[in-house]
């Protein structure tokens, strides 16, 4: 039975310092919501607005990151092919092969879509966390494994996060194989705070925030309390290095122009 004197915590956010300083009888002025920034005005982004852009991933974090650079109207079509590459591969090779397979599987399924038309761009990615001894860690499969995974990352000091990104676009020309494919792999070093207690790890696991994430934590959320520092790209740890992704988009969408330049140079020689 609850204590009758206990009052539930208010659901509203705490007042700002300015509001708190107002006299009690002052009329509160409702502030407008913060204005979202305007989308990036880049030729490569403008060229695909209103066209089919597919994210071959169900990750809401990758969708959110792409929205930050102006790709807000994405089709979400995850690859259904099992990720069965051997863990004996190097982390670099493993994520690169997996991301490429995701992109090519979705491309093959959608390039001849007679209802919606061929996609203008497909983006796929794969992220793994790699322990200090080189073991590839993906999503925890149970609470016990989740706890053990985070304890291992704490006790080992630092670990690495690898994300591979693959971008594909059909070519306007008839050049074989009919599409442009560009890939990149980013690496970030993450160090957990060595003073993290088992109690904190258990409390974090109970939130379930990290249950669907490689390595078992989300640096963009509550999982930030586990991290002491990083070396490299923050959004790479989240699941999609934006700067590298934008560079790949520019390459695949300008691939026909690059081929024409190469062909012209060969004729001149």
Image: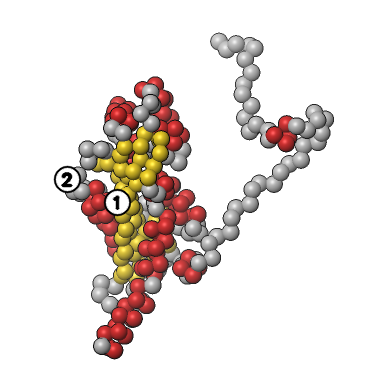
Depth check, front residue: 239 or 121: 239
Q: Which mark is residue 102?
A: none
**Residue 178 in the image: x percent, y percent?**
29, 73
- Identity of the residue drawn at 45% across and 57% down: 74
Q: Is residue 138 above or below residue 120?
A: above
At 22% from the left edge and 41% from the top edge, which residue is drawn? 134
Query: On the rendered structure, is 204 left or right of 72?
Result: left
Q: Which residue is mark 2?
A: 88
Query: Which of disc 1 and disc 2 is earlier in sequence?
Result: 1
Q: Residue at x 46, y 38 (%)?
A: 221
Which secondary structure lies at badge 2? Answer: loop
Residue 93, visible in the rendered structure: yes
The answer to whether one can see residue 107 in this image is: no
Quarter of the image where one finds residue 249: bottom left
* Residue 187 versus residue 166 in the image, above or below: above
Q: Which residue is mark 1?
A: 80
């Amino acid at each position: 039975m609850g204590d009758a004197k206990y009052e539930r915590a208010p659901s509203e956010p705490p007042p700002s310092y300015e509001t708190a300083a107002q006299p009690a009888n002052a009329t509160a002025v409702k502030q407008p919501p913060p204005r979202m920034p305007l989308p990036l005005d880049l030729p490569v982004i403008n060229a695909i607005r209103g066209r089919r852009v597919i994210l071959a991933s169900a990750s809401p974090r990758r969708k959110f990151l792409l929205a930050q650079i102006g790709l807000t109207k994405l089709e979400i079509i995850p690859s259904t092919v099992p990720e069965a590459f051997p863990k004996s591969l190097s982390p670099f090779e493993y994520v690169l092969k997996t991301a490429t397979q995701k992109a090519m599987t979705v491309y093959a399924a959608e390039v001849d879509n007679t209802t919606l038309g061929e996609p203008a761009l497909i983006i796929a990615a794969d992220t793994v966390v790699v322990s200090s001894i080189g073991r590839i860690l993906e999503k925890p499969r149970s609470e016990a494994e989740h706890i053990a995974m985070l304890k291992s990352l704490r006790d080992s000091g630092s670990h690495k996060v690898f994300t591979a990104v693959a971008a594909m676009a059909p070519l306007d020309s008839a050049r074989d194989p009919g599409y442009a494919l560009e890939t990149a792999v980013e690496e970030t070093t993450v160090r957990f705070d060595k003073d993290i207690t088992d109690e904190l790890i258990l409390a974090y696991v109970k939130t379930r925030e990290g249950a669907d994430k490689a390595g078992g934590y989300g640096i963009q959320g509550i999982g930030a309390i586990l991290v002491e520092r990083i070396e490299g790209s923050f959004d790479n740890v989240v699941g999609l290095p934006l700067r590298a992704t934008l560079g790949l988009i520019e390459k695949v969408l300008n691939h026909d122009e690059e081929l024409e330049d190469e062909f012209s140079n060969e004729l001149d020689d």
